[in-house]
Image (cartoon, rainbow, N blue to C red):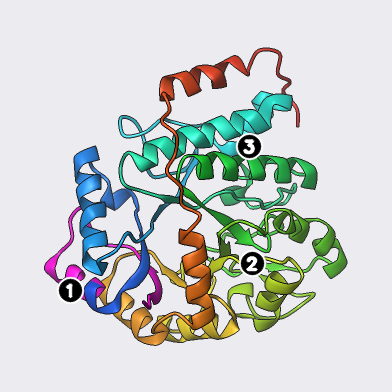
Amino acid sequence: MHYGATIFGCEGQTLSAAEASFFRASDPFGFILFDRNLAGADQIRALCDALRDTVGRDAPILIDQEGGRVQRLRPPLASEWVPPLEDVQRFGANAPRAMYLRYRIIAAELMALGIDANCAPMVDIATEETHPFLKNRCYGNDLETVVKIGQAVAGGLLDGGVLPVLKHVPGHGRAVADSHLDLPVVETNGEVLRKSDFAAFCALNDLPMGMTAHITYSAFDDRPATLSPKMMGLIREDIGFDGLIMTDDISMKALTGSLGELSRLSLDAGCDVILHCNGKMGEMEDVAGASGAMTTQALARAKAALACRRTPDPVDISHLQAQLEALLDGSVNEL
């Protein structure tokens, strides 16, 4: 079996005939959902079923459900969450257990809707200069805290049957620009990056899937990591990440060039899968045409990632929520 080297979004709350036909032909590895796709529980489950039916298999369906601003599902479909950094701060010493419970609840809510991959944990280390689009999505401003919380987040998702996607490899925290709009350039010394930002990803290099950062690290290359063979080699060899690597959304404005060209450059650099999110048919056709099928090595990583899916033990979400609230007793307010 071969999969297309793509993960695609779709335009609305149901699949059009054109979308279904395109997905059948291009056979993307998986799909990703956004606000525009989410109206009600029955509708979401039906959409997930329809997406999987187009490729004839249990394809992974991804979402960004971090909490705070980056939270696609909200009440009554799912619990409301403050930004991750706020919870880490308010739970203090209890934060690792609290964040495990938070993401175990998130996993249960996602699985109930047919969604089985979440774009988290995000182990970018915050600094004073971190751009506001990212800062309160981080778990802390030191390596030890970020690693502990990242491991807890991943554990909660995996125990709940949801595949975690580690992001943004090899580290977005020093970016002072929003990569949705511009290309951030990090000029920090390479040794400093290895001992801090990159080290966080080393500690979680056993996770099944990861997502690149559209960032240039000038100490290593003048190309964004997503397009850089040197940076992708660093991720594989120095950081030791051998899971499936998808690009961040290939249509973000940090990258310049045609989507077909960017897709090919990303795969040539060492990415396994191209992530394209906006559901625009013409763009998806260009990406699929340039991307083709997964390489043999990428396919092996994809199968290994899917093998990490597990059937979760039944849980009572209200019981997990009660445990979470109880952890606030005696917690401190500082990292």
Q: Is residue 301 above or below residue 335?
A: below
Q: Earlier in the sequence, mark 3 or mark 2?
A: 3
Q: Is residue 40 visible?
A: no
State the image coordinates of residue 13 (x, y, percent, origin top left). Answer: 21, 52
Marks 2/1: CA–CA distance? 37 Å
Query: Magenta span has 310?
Result: no
Residue where numbered disc 1 is placed: 21
Mark 3 vs mark 1: in front: 1
State the image coordinates of residue 32 (x, y, percent, origin top left). Answer: 37, 58
Labelled pair 3, 1 in contact (Cβ < 8 Å): no
Labelled pair 2, 1 in contact (Cβ < 8 Å): no
Q: Amino acid at mark 2?
A: Pro
Q: Earlier in the sequence, mark 3 or mark 1?
A: 1
Residue where numbered disc 3 is placed: 85
Q: Amino acid at mark 1?
A: Ser
- Determine the secondary structure under disc 3: helix
Q: Is residue 32 visible?
A: yes
Q: Is residue 161 above or below residue 225?
A: above
- At x 55%, y 30%, the residue is 101
Residue where numbered disc 2 is placed: 184
- Determine the secondary structure under disc 2: loop
Left or right: where 58 falls relative to 318: left
State the image coordinates of residue 249 (x, y, percent, origin top left). Answer: 46, 66
Q: Residue furthest left?
A: 17
Query: Magenta span has 13?
Result: yes
Marks 3/1: CA–CA distance? 42 Å
- Determine the secondary structure under disc 1: helix
Q: Which residues are magenta?
A: 1-23
Left or right: where 335 falls relative to 110: right
